[in-house]
Amino acid sequence: MTPSPDDYTAIANLLAEYCLALDHDEVDRCVGLFTDDGAFEVYGRSFEGRDRIRKMMESAPSGLHLGGPPWVETVEGDRARTRQNLLFVDRTSGEFRRTLYTDELHRSPDGWRIRRRRCQFITAEGVRDRPDG
């Protein structure tokens, strides 16, 4: 189903908060945007649960996360699926990565949260699990 305007706004704000929290090195705030059983998939690996997501984020390079507007594919009750493109600019080297997020979201008493986030990279060969193809 197409999201209501309220759901779209709440989901867009969730994904914007994710980017801004990382830009400001607020890892705990970012991790809090995931469900307790959330997962983050990147580089062909899956980090399950908030503790493992936190460790992964703490070891990842810092930088700027420029997220495009999300496409909310569907909202069905307390579940939603989204896709969003993102440009990451490394704070130290200035190198950038073009990425695509595919998300499964869950509506909780605290609002929408990320249940599963998959990060893929946009390369010359197409969308891949690693930036080097």
Image (cartoon, rainbow, N blue to C red):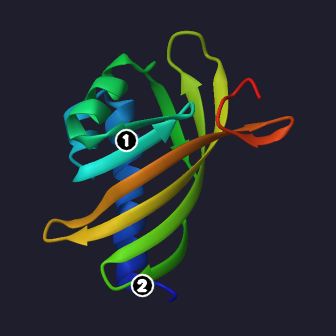
Q: Quadrant of residue 123?
A: top right
In screen coordinates, is 26 left or right of 66? left
Residue visible at 45% across and 18% down in the picture: 61
Q: CA distance from mark 1 to mark 2?
A: 22 Å
Q: Secondary structure at mark 1?
A: helix
Instruction: Give how far across and how far down residue 21 sits, in percent.
Output: 32, 39
Three-letter code, disc 2? Pro
Instruction: Give how far across and how far down residue 53 sits, in percent.
Output: 31, 35
Q: Quadrant of the C terminus?
A: top right
In screen coordinates, is 108 left or right of 116? left
Q: Which residue is mark 1?
A: 20
Three-letter code, disc 1? Leu
> Could you classify mark 1 by the number of other residues whose Cα lies within 10 Å: few (under 14), some (14-19), or many (20 or more)?
some
Q: Any mark on residue 5, and which?
A: 2
**Earlier residue among tags 1 and 2:** 2
Vertical placement of residue 91 versus 124, above or below: above
Q: Any mark on residue 107, and which?
A: none
